[in-house]
Amino acid sequence: MSTFDSTKRLLPEILAEIVKAKIQLPDFQRGWVWDDQHIRSLLVSIARSFPVGAVMLLETGGEAKFQVRPVEGVTLPPGASDAELLILDGQQRLTTLTQVLATKDAVKTRTEKGKPIRRHYYWNIEVALEGGDRLEDAIEAIEEDKIKRSNFGRQIDLDLTTTQKECEQLYFPCDQILNSDAWEEALQEYAPEKFGLYMQFRRQVLNAFRNYQLPVIQLGKATTKEAVCLVFEKVNTGGVPLNVFELVTATYAADGFNLRDDWHGNATRNVSGRYQRLCKEALLSQVESTDFLQAVSMLHTLELRRADVASGKTGKSVQPVSAKRVSILAMPLSAYAKWADEVEAGFLLAAKFLRKECVKTPRELPYRTQLAPLASVLAHLRERWLEPRIYQKLSHWYWSGVLGELYGSAIETRIANDVEDLLQWIDSDDAIPRTIADAAFSPDRLDTMTSRLSAAYKGLNVLVLREGAQDFFWKAKIQELDDEELALDIHHIFPQDWCEKNGIKRAVYNTVVNKTPISYKANRMIGGHAPSIYLSKLQAHTQVQLADAQMNAIVGSHLIDTTALRADDFDSFYKARKAALVKLVERAMGKAVSAAAGEAELGEAADDDSEQLVISPAV
């Protein structure tokens, strides 16, 4: 069964309904943004009876209930009835035509450079009668006081401050296009000799507006919120995709709840927003409104699922745990009110968990997308998350997602599965969560890992820090230096210059195996020297003075074989550190790399698309 109809409607009829507020905008529609040039082009297109595209309207009164607002420039008339139709596509065109043709106030627009301006639009009748390309030249955009000036405002070029002056100079105001009776009477009084020219203009230009038919696609009441969201994104290909948060905001507003204030806060209304509170934890500054709604949706649908199971339902009749948009859009306000505080507390606990795992800054966070399922689980666990056995399970799940690189895209199903799986695993030791089972890490992945933006690269760096890596110069762990906000970065262990001079290929020396976090001070002293030379320089520095054993301990804290490093033996160093990093991965994921895992030959880095080796659970 079709959920829409297509037809044509007269432009004046549509504008009349907009002015009467029978046609309005859903609150998720963004503001009107057209500039002066776009307005002129639209007016010319209609004057020439050119197509300007279809508009899409949605019937109100169905499932998709939204907070609504009138089209910009329209004041709701006293006793206005509820909107009958909502504009989904065509907002810019209909708002433009409403302001120019159907209201008397100056049109709020902007220049091509974005400067806000207010203008009245007029037709120069004599120029307009030349037709064709001259129509655009016939449109005059006059200042709000209806006076056109030049020479920095000192000279008046055109004065249209009274109807008499408009008539005498044959400048027709666009706000008279739909009904020009009063202006025509004035023309008969002030300039009757020009009435003939005006009648030609009415036939050629005004009638084009009055008889113009707009193609209209009208969605019926049965259209779901999910369908509205999808349709809106499809037809608004030139704009920013509609965020599910905006759609839910408009839905909840219809029930008297301001979701935007609840999330962002509002100083005017003295409302503290959840995002403001979350941002007190630096790690949560990247949390998006959609992440929060996903977490609420997962807890809501988990509750429904458990109720279905308890009532004896089976199979597809059981509600799945879901973070998908359709589930978020179907989530009632009562569910948000029930779970929002719990979810906020869960996100704050997630930040605490991550700090214990040595993820302390947003740049160290491999995946923002893991925060929502983690927050949902912690909202359920509360203080239990610190129990050693539970904490270990959470840690294994977290690092499996990071090092298995499973949270990069299309994660709605995964995060919902993780919430259900994790809570079940924590309560029983039964089935291992799918993310842990799916996670695979090939030792050869280390031979291709060069981008510090990849999740696994970030994860390995954090794990090295978690092992207690100490700086080569400062007497402190790298994490301590990071807390002191000293300049830190990930640098080559065997310097790039040395590698180039000794024939080590970039594909090898530039991988994570040959990199480690150290301070700017240590890196400057390393320079392009061989390790045997820079280690001696560091040890002998006046402010350092370390024995070999002490320096070896510092180097070893980075999982580096000091014997190979001091011997400037790159191949032995690389092989030993790669093996040490693999063991680090195994400890983090709680899984052992298969003994059959091969090693890439140095100088022949494995392809990014190479088959990953299967990892079996550690015994």
Image: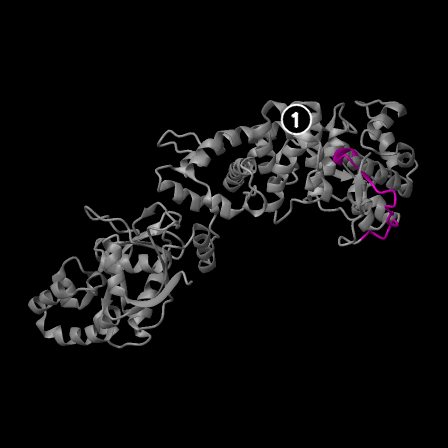
For this rendering, which residue is in front, 152 or 67?
67
Q: Position of residue 280 (x, y in %)?
A: 53, 28
Q: Position of residue 344 (x, y in %)?
A: 52, 31
Query: In the drawing, does residue 138 fall left or right of residue 396?
Result: left
Q: Residue at x 36, y 64 (%)?
A: 5
Label 1, residues with CA under 10 Å away: few <14, some 14-19, many ≥20: few
For this rendering, which residue is in front, 157 or 177?
177
Kindly tell me whether residue 446 is visible in this rendering: yes
Q: Secondary structure at mark 1?
A: helix
Query: In the drawing, does residue 223 fall left or right of residue 157?
Result: right
Query: In the drawing, does residue 325 fall left or right of residue 43?
Result: right
Main SS class of the magenta portion in the image: loop
**Amino acid type of the residue that numbered disc 1 sits on in the rendered structure:** Asp
Residue tagged by mark 1?
A: 483
> What's drawn in magenta, residue-wise?
587-606
Relative to 505, say whether 371 is above or below.
above
Q: Residue at x 43, y 46 (%)?
A: 247
Q: Position of residue 195 (x, y in %)?
A: 12, 73
